[in-house]
């Protein structure tokens, strides 16, 4: 229908249609277009007028020296856990990274122009972005935040900019509290901060709330080994001072998430088999010494426990601490080994006599 209407308009009123399609008011960026102009023409004129002479490398700082940096609020919405690799100390989350700030260069009067909201193309690539964006970076990164998808930023008449974009948050974690594995609650901390601009230029703070969790049905975390304990998620803001610039603060936003592990898998696949094998290894004491299967039974039990140990070792990190599951497996192997040694001694002394 719209195509037919546009065709009829172009045939009946060719001059008017040309003005409508080409937005001829864009030629003069100093004079706002008339109120009767189409809305998309008003948006195009406003975007071009506000970006004339705009420098995407310079933060929108106000006058007043170092006392007036750009305040950027940062928030993270965790959509889903993608992967938790305890062995390689890597955590990958699917998140929506949100930032908001005020850019006074993008202010306009909605009563004059008639536009209540604009969308500017925003990117960490300085050759692609149309507006200034914070150079926020993940410090303990496995992959950079610059790999997030480029999304438009919403800009409002008072210069308020809201930029939200989805992407994978891949973090190199220093997992803590692993000694009780698999009944542990490991935690991972990651830090976000400016890369090239100190706190004198850009000051990062937390949104309210600093961390949120998606409630969409597609964000459900069923049939996963880990889930995030929302009540145990902690945030902390710090300021670092580096030797290069001891008088410049570098604000850093720290997030710490605590994970709840599905321990039933380890219980059924590792803990219960090792305990059962340890008890079975004691059955050789009830075998008659003249039974040849007594020795082979003990060897079979020991080999089965070694096989379980090899499989479980693929799930465990290599660390100097003694983990609960490693101690359990070691003790079970020790019982089976002692039972086999006792069998060998009994058989040896019986036939020697």
Image: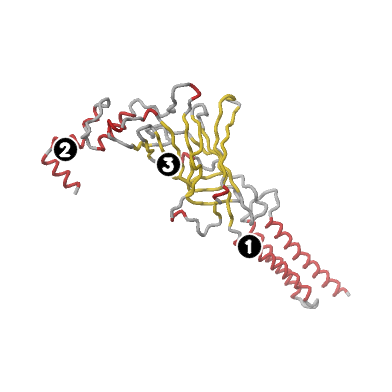
Quadrant where the C terminus lies? bottom right
Residue shown at the point (61%, 26%) measured from the top left:
243
What residue did someone put label 1 on? Answer: 267
Q: In this view, does 85 lie to the left or right of 9?
A: right
Residue 305 figure quarter? bottom right
In front here: 214 or 176? 214
Categorize mark 1 by other alpha carbons within 10 Å: few (<14), some (14-19), many (20+): some
Read off the residue under disc 3: 164
- Comparing 243 with 66, the one in front is 66
Picture disc at residue 115: none
Secondary structure of the residue carrying numbered label 1 = helix
Residue 204: percent from left, percent from top? 50, 34
* Residue bearing mark 2: 17
- Asked which secondary structure carries label 2, the reply is helix
- Identify whether 269 is placed above or below 66: below
Q: For residue 114, what is the image quadrant?
A: top left
Q: Position of residue 87 (x, y in %)?
A: 61, 51
Residue 30, image x and y in percent?
27, 25
Question: Does 305 sit above or below residue 44?
Answer: below
Tag in front: 1 or 3: 3
Q: Which of marks 2 and 1 is nearer the N terminus?
A: 2
Across and down, in percent, residue 233 comes to 56, 46
Which quadrant of the figure has residue 39? top left
Q: Distance between the residues labelled 3 and 2?
A: 37 Å
In the image, is residue 160 above or below residue 87? above
Secondary structure of the residue carrying tag 3 is: strand
């Amino acid at each position: 229908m719209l195509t037919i209407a546009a065709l009829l308009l172009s045939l009946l009123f060719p001059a008017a249609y040309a003005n409508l399609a080409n937005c001829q008011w864009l030629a003069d960026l100093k004079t706002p277009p008339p109120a009767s102009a189409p809305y998309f023409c008003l948006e195009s004129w406003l975007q071009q007028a506000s970006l004339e002479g705009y420098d995407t490398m310079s933060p929108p700082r106000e006058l007043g020296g170092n006392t007036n940096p750009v305040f950027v609020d940062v928030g993270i919405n965790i959509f889903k856990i993608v992967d938790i690799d305890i062995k390689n100390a890597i955590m990958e989350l699917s998140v929506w990274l949100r930032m908001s700030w005020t850019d006074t260069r993008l202010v306009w009067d909605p009563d004059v122009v008639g536009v209540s909201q604009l969308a500017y193309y925003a990117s960490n690539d300085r050759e692609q972005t149309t507006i200034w964006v914070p150079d926020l970076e993940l410090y303990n990164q496995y992959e950079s935040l610059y790999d997030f998808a480029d999304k438009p930023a919403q800009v409002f008449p008072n210069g308020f900019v809201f930029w939200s974009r989805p992407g994978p948050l891949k973090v190199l974690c220093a997992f803590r509290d692993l000694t009780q594995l698999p009944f542990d609650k490991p935690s991972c901390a990651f830090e976000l901060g400016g890369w090239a601009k100190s706190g004198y230029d850009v000051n990062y703070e937390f949104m309210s709330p600093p961390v949120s969790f998606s409630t969409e049905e597609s964000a459900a975390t069923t049939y996963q080994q880990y889930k995030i304990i929302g009540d145990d998620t902690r945030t902390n803001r710090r300021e670092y001072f580096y030797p290069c610039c001891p008088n410049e603060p570098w604000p850093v936003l720290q997030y710490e998430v605590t994970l709840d592990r599905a321990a039933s898998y380890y219980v059924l696949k590792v803990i219960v088999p090792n305990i059962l094998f340890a008890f079975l290894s004691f059955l050789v004491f009830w075998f008659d010494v003249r039974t040849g299967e007594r020795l082979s039974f003990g060897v079979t039990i020991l080999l089965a426990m070694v096989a379980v140990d090899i499989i479980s070792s693929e799930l465990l990190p290599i660390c100097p601490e003694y983990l609960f599951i490693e101690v359990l497996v070691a003790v079970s192997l020790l019982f089976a080994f002692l039972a086999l040694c006792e069998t060998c001694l009994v058989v040896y002394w019986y036939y020697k006599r």
